[in-house]
């Protein structure tokens, strides 16, 4: 009988589901809201393709870092609308100009996070900004393969496990496939995200228009979650607004596999790796204006050739990979840390309301309340543009 990877190691990449020739595998959500593969034994013919495709149990060819950079998008508007330095937009723009297709995580009409394909520059804004929820891949891998077979260039952006899953599914070298992974802290529960949104709408008596997990209303170093409501209000630096990422960073809500991630290493299957640059700029005399810097790892000849094509659209300085890893690369190697009370949290889930859960598991200290009030005053008075004050607050925060 076919046996898939153990649940605690499964990243939910969907490779097994989409490769099944009999469509005998479906992705079903568990009690925490994470999707796992389930085999229909009546359809399964025991061919083993799912087991051979799984990126967890099968070794893949990895790409080492060839060149590394600190870089920013020269388009200030795109950079401001991005989580860090806006490099994804530059790479995506190049692909779209070549009549290519770009895949990334986007909100749907109900603010659920799904992997989405775009073919026009006007739609690129949907894929910008981090979404701290595990995205629903659906049949994305099949769509990618369809575009590749139509001789279209495809850029796929995702977490390392998603990129590895796609690479395993495609299972061939294709000059038109560009893989970009984002250094990842883990993926929080989509089910809890629904509860969070409901609690926000109830408290602020308005539907949610958008959620910016990495808003730069306070700059890059103090980037914070901000929520735009349909009534026009933008709320940030408030306890309830911050609660969802706080639960995540506290180690309660990531997918179980994230606590022992199989993809935490410098060498990866991707062509590009992108992640925040917070500490490296000073060592390379690169101006940090607090609007976001990106670390860029170029891994393949394909990526090197593309980088040469976009150099005029970026400001960049070459860096040493080892230095970048030391300064900003802890999550390249380190898995998220599971909270000792995680099992208790999920036992309480469903028994307690969302607000009762955050009261119990992430109490709001007086120091944090004061810090949040200071941040709101900074924004309202324009002091949020003062880099010296923000750097001081960053030190106090740590």
Image (cartoon, rainbow, N blue to C red):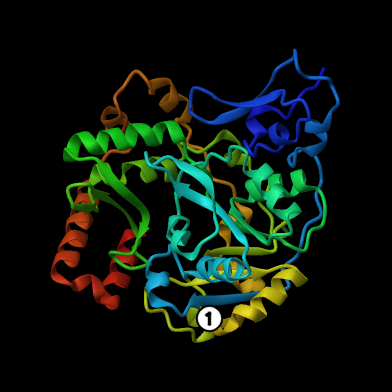
Q: Residue at x 42, y 39 (%)?
A: 112
Whether residue 31 is visible? yes
Q: Which residue is drawn at 57% across and 34% down?
A: 256
Above-or-below relation of 222 to 301: above
Position of 333 with respect to 203 (left or right) is: right
**What is the x, y in percent for residue 393?**
28, 66
**What is the x, y in percent for residue 310?**
60, 78
Residue 370 vs residue 50, the one in the foreground: 50
The quadrant the C terminus occupies is bottom left
Can you name the residue that lies furthest to the top here? 42
**What is the x, y in percent for residue 54?**
75, 37
Whether residue 315 is visible? no
Q: Kindly identify which residue carries mark 1.
A: 313
The quadrant the N terminus occupies is top right
**What is the x, y in percent for residue 219?**
33, 68
Position of 133 with respect to 198 (left or right) is: right
Q: Which residue is drawn at 44% across and 30% down?
A: 341
Q: Which residue is drawn at 73% across and 55% down?
A: 150
Above-or-below relation of 371 to 191: below
Element type at mark 1: helix
Residue 312 vs residue 295, the one in the foreground: 312
Residue 396 vs residue 176, the one in the foreground: 176
């Amino acid at each position: 009988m076919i046996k898939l990877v153990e649940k605690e190691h499964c990243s939910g990449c969907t490779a097994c589901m989409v490769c099944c020739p009999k469509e005998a595998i479906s992705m079903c959500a568990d009690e925490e809201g994470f999707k796992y593969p389930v085999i229909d034994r009546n359809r399964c013919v025991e061919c083993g393709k799912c087991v051979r495709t799984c990126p967890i149990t099968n070794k893949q060819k990895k790409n080492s870092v060839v060149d590394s950079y600190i870089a920013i998008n020269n388009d200030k508007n795109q950079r401001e609308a991005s989580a860090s330095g806006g490099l994804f937009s530059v790479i995506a723009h190049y692909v779209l100009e070549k009549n290519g297709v770009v895949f990334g995580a986007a909100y749907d009409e109900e603010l659920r996070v799904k992997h989405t394909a775009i073919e026009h520059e006007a739609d690129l804004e949907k894929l910008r900004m981090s979404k701290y929820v595990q995205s629903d891949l659906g049949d994305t891998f099949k769509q990618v393969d369809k575009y590749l077979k139509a001789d279209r260039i495809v850029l796929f952006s995702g977490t390392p496990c998603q990129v590895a899953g796609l690479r395993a599914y495609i299972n061939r070298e294709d000059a038109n496939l560009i893989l970009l992974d984002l250094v990842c802290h883990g993926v929080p529960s989509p089910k809890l995200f629904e509860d969070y949104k409901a609690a926000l709408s109830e408290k602020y008596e308005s539907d949610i228009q958008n959620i910016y997990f990495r808003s730069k209303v306070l700059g890059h170093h103090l980037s914070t979650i901000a929520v735009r409501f349909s009534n026009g209000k933008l709320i940030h630096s408030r306890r309830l607004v911050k609660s969802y990422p706080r639960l995540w960073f506290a180690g309660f809500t990531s997918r179980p596999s994230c606590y022992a991630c199989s993809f935490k290493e410098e060498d990866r299957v991707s062509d590009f790796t992108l992640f925040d640059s917070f500490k490296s700029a000073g060592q390379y005399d690169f101006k940090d204006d607090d609007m976001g810097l990106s670390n860029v790892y170029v891994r393949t000849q394909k990526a090197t050739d593309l980088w040469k094509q976009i150099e005029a659209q970026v400001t960049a300085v070459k860096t040493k990979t080892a230095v970048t890893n030391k300064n900003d690369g802890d999550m390249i190697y380190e898995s998220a840390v599971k909270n000792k009370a995680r099992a208790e949290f999920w036992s309480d889930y469903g028994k307690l309301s969302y607000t009762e859960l955050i009261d119990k598991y992430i109490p709001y200290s007086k120091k944090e309340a004061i810090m949040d009030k200071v941040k709101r005053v900074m924004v309202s008075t324009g002091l949020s543009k003062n880099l010296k004050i923000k750097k001081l607050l960053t030190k106090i925060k740590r």
